[in-house]
Image (cartoon, grey):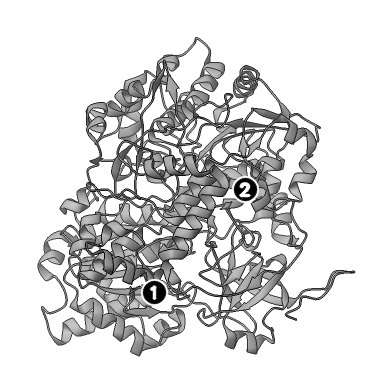
Amino acid sequence: MLIDEYSTQVNTRPQSTQSAAEAEDARANRHDERSPGEPPEESSAAQLGKRYTVAAGIPAVVQTMKFGLAEMGATRSLRSFLAVNQEDGFDCQSCAWPSPDTGRKIAEFCENGAKAIADELTRRRIGPEFFERFSIRELLKQSDYWLNAQGRLTHPMIKREGSTHYQPIEWADAFALIGSELRALARPDEAIFYTSGKTCNEAAFLFQLFARQLGTNNLPDCSNMCHESSGTALTETIGIGKGTVTLEDFNQCDTILILGSNPGTNHPRMLTSLEAAKRNGAAIIAINPMPETGLMRMINPNPQDYPNPFRFVGALVGSGTALTDLHVPVRVNGDAALLQGIIKSLLDRERSAPGTILDRSFIEQQTTGFAEFEAGVAATSWEEIAQSSGIDRAMIEKAADVVARAKRMIVLWCLGLTQQPNGVDNVRQVINLLLMGGHIGRPGAGACCVRGHSNVQGDRTMGVWERPREPFLAALDAEFGIRAPRRGGYDTVESLHAMHDRSAKLFFAISGNLLQAVSDTQYAAEAFSRCPLAVHVSTKLHRGHLLAGQRSLILPCLGRAERNLRAGENQLSTVEDSMGIINPSRGSLAPASLHLLSDAEIIVRTAQAAFGANTPVDWESLLDHDRIREHIARVVPGFEDFNARIRKGIFYLPNGARERVFHTPTGKAMFSVCSVPEHALGPGELLMTTVRSHDQFNTTIYGLNDRYRGIYKGRRVILLNPDDMNELGVRAGQWVDITSHFEGETRVARRFKAVSYPIARKSAATYFPEGNVLVPIRSVAALSNQPSHKCVLVTLTASEIPTGSQRDENQ
């Protein structure tokens, strides 16, 4: 059993101490002033150009080489690209899509993975002289793209209280400062420990051990913001907070449903699996407010996938493989209603022809709650379904036709489903649909929860979670002779509340950019500015470093592709991909600076500074990754004989649901009764979602182009349906201000260029982090507390033309 399978939960989380007066002030506040944490307005408008309608292909190859040569040079590009995702190389620090178990290609990476590698291995550097030249105020005026483009951090830096600049600090002094501040805390819960998927398993295990020896479960991570709704729903319904499929299932399936996912930009290597499924005859339905290029058509640019070289040449110059058989342009937050409609149609067909649609044997023997689920669906009218989804019954029946024929179906989803107020219900509906046909625990079928960042799933497996299960804590205590706290900790949203009301005194982040990843930029910036000490372990500069409170530390660390030497030997690390496979990862390139330390060493040295000699944990020994893995093997189920197994190659973690073993209270998979959300939009109101551009991974901006949407040299755009634009009186190219509305509060983001786009009616889309300022901090998913970036009620007004500026040529 893995950590998130346990059903016994620890006690409630600690509560922040926000006063009633502060809460009332927050509710009454009109958030219309630009926050220093918000990306600045652009000096020139984004330009519209060619919208690429085929993913990958020659343009992807060209962009890969362009980024590689520009950032790394020819030799470094060749070395890194040949090593990435190879069993004797390093795991890509970008998305978590798995590599094949065997027969990996020479070029086992995608365009956006190449951008991530080139970005980390850039030849550009940021040293003390950079911070001497630029004040924090000056850096805040720069774009996120500019900040990231300056290069790799090379020295530990400190912003002292009252200082306008970062200054260099010795490593020993930095550790001493953190240790002193930790010892001075009135209680352990005044410290917050955050991490993202960049962290390897070994460092993540040390990080949670450090926090729990200190006495807190305040271990928020990026899972809180991306797939917390998935983990909540999956654990409840099938007994494990992870997906159930493997890559081999894509070779055997006959039907794939893709919801809330844009694989061409966010995880392009998935396209290879989709193409293989399509080649084997699978039907694919894409459910998305926009016809994303990566969902519609792709060209596979890898010659190793073509036995005949003439077919490879033909593919490159042809129109590519059509992936989607049916695109369903659901409105923003209409997925639950749409799934309810498909389910309703299937149940109607089963009643008309018993035994033709449902897997009755599986339902009766392996599930519970079907009768209540069926009654809940029957109580939902087609009018409710059509109004909430934005899709008429005829198209829903078309989708149901495909699902009704499925014998081996995979349902695949990402943040478009989870970052909603009803995100948990969205995922429950996915599981309902799979359980109806028995599509869990058999070849070619199952739930595919697409994790976005390389080791975000591994972080959670290693115990980075604010609500750990008792068996894990008991094993940790026995292994190290500590007493881990049982009281629940803060997740990301609760952490911001705690910093905002000053009940948290120290924020420690191993990688990640929480400021730009979380909702409500103004609130988040205020929270960081009120924190007495912020510690950021990072490879590159980002805006989160600049919103420091009294003091802030930037501690530069090794990248995943770089050597991590100990006693002259290069250390092996591991990561977990989105299908529960543990992969070895060995960096081989020279570090960007002699002053860099690994994540693990930074944690060890901080722990030594905090605990001194009075500790049952032998922290010095934990500089050795083999020693860390010995401990993991005894604490985390599924990692037995860890060192020996990982040196033989990859291995799979146990997944009960994959074997139709459901670790739920009933021992069976559970159907859920899910309601259809209502959105009674008034005149001029739209539901906005935030999305990535193609030159972006998470909060990192690699460039200012989005060729799949035809947007170039800018990011402050809002995508609108042309019919909605006509109704609103908004012209293409016009500058508009966006105002969000939530429980009497309003927030304003200024000067976004209106772009006519084939998005669903009454829907809108902006890029994040630019759009995050509009997402209320209190707008979260029920049960999971995940921020709802994908469902924001907005209105538009014409922007004022700044004095002395020229009108945009498109106006």
Inspect the image, locate mark 1, and give the three-letter code of the amino acid beneath it.
Answer: Met
Identify the mark nearer the N-term, 1 or 2. 1
The quarter of the picture where the N terminus appears is top left
Who's the residue at 40% across and 15% down the image?
A: 621
Q: Quadrant of residue 775?
A: bottom right
Q: Residue furthest right?
A: 804
* Residue position for label 2: 515
Q: Residue furthest top?
A: 613
Depth check, front residue: 734 or 664: 734
Q: Is residue 170 above or below residue 120?
A: above
Disc marking residue 319: none
Q: Characterize the local packing of mark 1: few (<14), some (14-19) or many (20 or more) Cα atoms within 10 angstroms.
A: many
Q: Position of residue 423 (x, y in %)?
A: 43, 62
Who's the residue at 77% across and 75% down the image?
A: 808
The quarter of the picture where the C terminus appears is bottom right
Looking at the image, can residue 781 be seen?
A: no
Q: Quadrant of residue 720?
A: bottom right
Depth check, front residue: 566 or 717: 566
Looking at the image, residue 795 sits to the left or right of residue 51; the answer is right
Depth check, front residue: 18 or 802: 802
* Residue position for label 1: 296
Q: Position of residue 163 (x, y in %)?
A: 80, 32
Q: Nearer the viewer, mark 1 or mark 2?
A: 1
- The reply to whether callout 1 and callout 2 are in contact (CB within 8 Å) is no
Q: Position of residue 729 (x, y in %)?
A: 69, 87
Q: Secondary structure at mark 2?
A: helix
Q: What is the distance, in whole Å, between disc 1 and disc 2 at their CAs?
A: 33 Å
Inspect the image, locate mark 2, and give the three-letter code of the amino acid beneath it.
Answer: Leu
Depth check, front residue: 298 or 66: 66
Who's the residue at 60% across and 72% down the image?
A: 793
